[in-house]
Amino acid sequence: MKLVVGLGNPGSQYDGTRHNIGWEVLDHLARRMGWIGNGDDFNRVARTKFSGLAMDGTVELGGQSDKLLLLKPTTYMNNSGQSVQAAMAFYQLSPADLMVVLDDLALPCGKIRLRAGGSNGGHNGLRDIERALGTNQYPRLRIGIDPAPDRVPGRDYVLGRFTEPQRNLIGSAIERSAAAIEMWMKNGIASAMNQFNAEVNVKED
């Protein structure tokens, strides 16, 4: 089984905010796999489990069948590790079976970057997952949301909503993120990194 965790905060006040881009990717994945229809709401259809909203099923990719669990922790960002650790312990997963999807202030809006492990980069969700698992060696997919503008605190910026130009870039990033996750499931993190990190995936002026 593979576990894909989208980081975000519960509550309608956080819908569509930059910090909840991980949740949006899971929404798209569930639709792409036919688990929910276009008009359905992941959060209403999902089960409440592992201190989060969970949806699981079997995925056919390239002739191989894999079990997949999509998980949105509802612990709030700073306690994401509680939810992730509970799911991994239940299914006896290794860190290599985990993919965490999150926002990244250090990347241009719409750019995606996969890593097999490493620093939390100051992201509170990753920091808590690292604490809960006792390792930082697990795959993650970062989605750029642009740095916070001058004189705007980072916390306020990530909890704000995308501008219209940013939202146009984010739609494409969500599509590429879903494709990258599918490649990771099928061929592993190295193959996914080689293809998707090498892409010029944001329009350059």
Image (tube, rainbow, N blue to C red):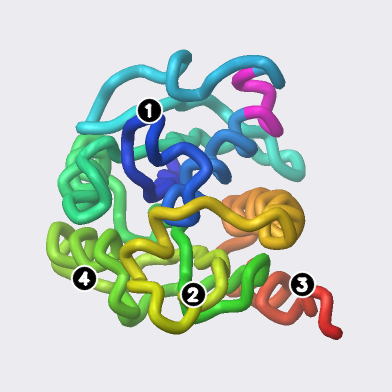
Split into 4 quadrants, where in the image is the C terminus? bottom right
Badge 2: how crowded within 10 Å, few (<14), some, or many (20+)? some
For badge 2, the amino acid type reads: Arg
Query: Which mark is on residue 201?
Result: 3
Label 1 to label 2: alpha-carbon separation: 24 Å
Sequence order check, earlier mark of 1 and 2: 1
Nearer to us: label 1 or label 4? 1
Q: Secondary structure at mark 4?
A: loop
Q: Could you tell me what secondary structure mostly forms the magenta stretch?
A: loop
Point out residue 66 in the picture as x, y percentages from the top left corner.
Answer: 55, 37
What residue is shown at x 14% (from left), y 65% (from top)?
A: 131
Label 4 to label 2: alpha-carbon separation: 14 Å
- Residue 117 figure quarter: bottom left
Residue where numbered disc 2 is placed? 115
Residue where numbered disc 4 is placed? 135
What residue is shown at x 70% (from left), y 41% (from top)?
A: 61
Q: Secondary structure at mark 1?
A: strand
Nearer to us: label 1 or label 3? 3
Q: Secondary structure at mark 3?
A: loop
Residues at discs 1 and 3 in contact (Cβ within 8 Å): no
What residue is shown at x 33% (from left), y 43% (from top)?
A: 9
Seen in the image, is 80 located left or right of residue 106?
A: left
Sequence order check, earlier mark of 4 and 2: 2
Label 1 to label 4: alpha-carbon separation: 23 Å
Report the magenta residues as a range: 31-36
Seen in the image, is 144 located left or right of residue 9?
A: right
For badge 3, the amino acid type reads: Asn
Point out residue 154 in the picture as x, y percentages from the top left corner.
Answer: 35, 71
Q: Nearer the viewer, residue 186 or 7?
A: 7
Label 1 to label 3: alpha-carbon separation: 30 Å
Q: Is residue 179 visible?
A: no
Residue where numbered disc 1 is placed? 54
